[in-house]
Image (cartoon, rainbow, N blue to C red):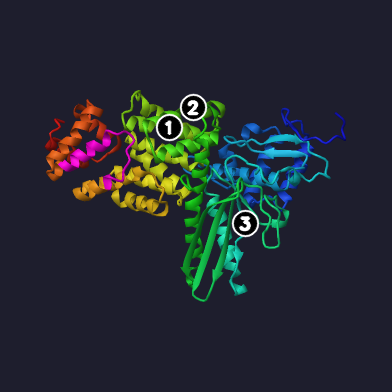
Amino acid sequence: MGTDEPLRRSRTAEPLGGVSPADIREQLERILGHPEFHATEKMKAFLRFVVEETLEGRKHRIKGYTIATKVFGRGDDFDAGQDPIVSIQAGRLRRALERYYLVAGGRDPVHVDIPKGRYIPRFKAQLTAAPADDLRSTIPHDQPRLLTGPTLAVVPLEDLSPDPEQQFLTLGLTNELVTELNRFQDIVVMPCDSPADTLQTQSPTAEQPRVPAARFILRGTVRTDPATFRVSMQLTDAADGHQLWAEAYTHPLEAGRFIATQEDIARSVVAAIASEYGIIARRLAAESRRKPPAELDTYEAMLRYYTHQITPSPESAQACLAALRRSAEREPDYGPVWSALATLHCQMYSFDAPGSENALETAQEYARKGVSLEPGSQLGRMILAYASHLADDPDVFAQESETALALNPNSPYTVGAIGYFHVMRGSFERGLPLLERAMAVNPCHPNWFHAGRVIHLISRRSYEEALAELEKHDPFFAFWLPVVRASILGNLGRLDEARTHLYQVREQKPDFASRARELFRRSLKVDSIIDDLIRGLCAAGLPV
């Protein structure tokens, strides 16, 4: 192959990808000085540190502890389990590098990235087409280029206000949207800070700025008058041009609440589109349902996992388990897959699924592995809290649940799940507000969130309300629904109705009567509520 022939491939060689240290240092300076490398000074220092340590032959020193102390100024007592700053910043740095190479560095001679699960950088000689061929023209407008997970372009909001002095509100809201979206680690956010230089999914017009070649595009407009701040938002799937979602938000225009109003709107938008059960996840999950587990990539397997959490069943659990196991074989260093597998084993233990021997021990092992591989993963921290709750380890549960909330306090799924765990531990004052907040911001929350309300109502002996709330709950294993119904009806003295449900219990779980307290206590850690449930079953005629 001649040296002047355009090349469109990348090659990799050890130990520095076939690239000289001088070329790597030149590329490092190119990245750090480019306006399209959207990174804070600390993130830039992070990148410089790990590159220089690698070039100096000190890869063995590139550990979370070293980065925390040398780059982020942490003390000698730094503990990654208590302070996930390195893993969080590593995730942001990976996204910044991905964005840089997508919108600006496609023709650079050296590609630099930091693989997931480690902090040691990787270098590749990037042999690209001749400069006359613009990289942007090689990406078809009808075929969005995807990175790891779905890509979302955030177009600067359009200011339609008559008063130009109010434009700072529009800019502030755009920035707040990007900030909130970046909390969700599965989505690659591509801000359009410089529309003239970005890739495009369609031909620009005077009214339509160019946007990155992302799968999803978020646009909006802002209008203000002397009394009102009104925002209209739309989400479009660039693959087919369909508008997936639109919403309008109206708030009073109060000088003292400008920032709070921007935060409220951004949280509402992001919860609707980017959360684990938001519009984007549901769109992609629907596409992945047509594939057998063996054909799912890792992100699609995770989507199947989230879908299973909304409508759990033994059948969906088996399909999800198969997909995740294959992903763990393909990408054993990807922490969220192990965390998702831990969830399934937690559920097997909680609901006494067939073959659940040693399920809790396996769940704890996988949950710890998920966190060790990805300390900054909110999912990982939340699942370790879940496994610790089931194992009745209150100290680890308290630590991990608070860490998970701190990583993204606006994730409806995580907030609701942790609220549910607190309720099941009898901590209603902590758990119920979290649960209610999660259910309020996301109408597509998992139905099992309602179980938290049911337990709280039973604790107050508000049995009629608990019975009504129970109708909204969709249990993982069918036998739990007639168990709780029979207990509530027994406590209400409606014994004929209760016996109907007891018949279902005996059919679906023949050994329940002999194991009732043990099975209740796997998830519910409040003995007084368990006593109440058993009292209702005894009144109904079940010899517990």
- Amino acid at dot 3: Val
State the CA–CA distance, disc 2 to disc 3: 38 Å
Quadrant for the C terminus in the image: top left
Please provide the residue range marked out in magenta.
469-489
Residue 170 at x, y percent in the picture? 58, 65
Residue with the mark numbered 2 = 325
The location of residue 174, given as percent across then percent down, is 58, 59
Q: Residues within 10 Å of mark 3 (few under 14, many from 20)?
A: many
Find the distance from the CA under tag 1 to the CA under tag 3.
Answer: 37 Å
Mark 3, residue position: 155
Residue assigned mark 1: 342
Tell me which numbered mark, 2 or 3, is placed earlier along the sequence: 3
Q: Secondary structure at mark 1?
A: helix
Residue 145, above or below 254: above
Residue farthest bottom in this picture: 226
Amino acid type of the residue that numbered disc 2 sits on in the rendered structure: Arg
Q: Earlier in the sequence, mark 1 or mark 3?
A: 3
Q: Nearer the viewer, mark 2 or mark 3?
A: 3
Query: From this viewpoint, is residue 8 visible?
Result: yes
Residue 270 image point, x, y percent: 50, 53
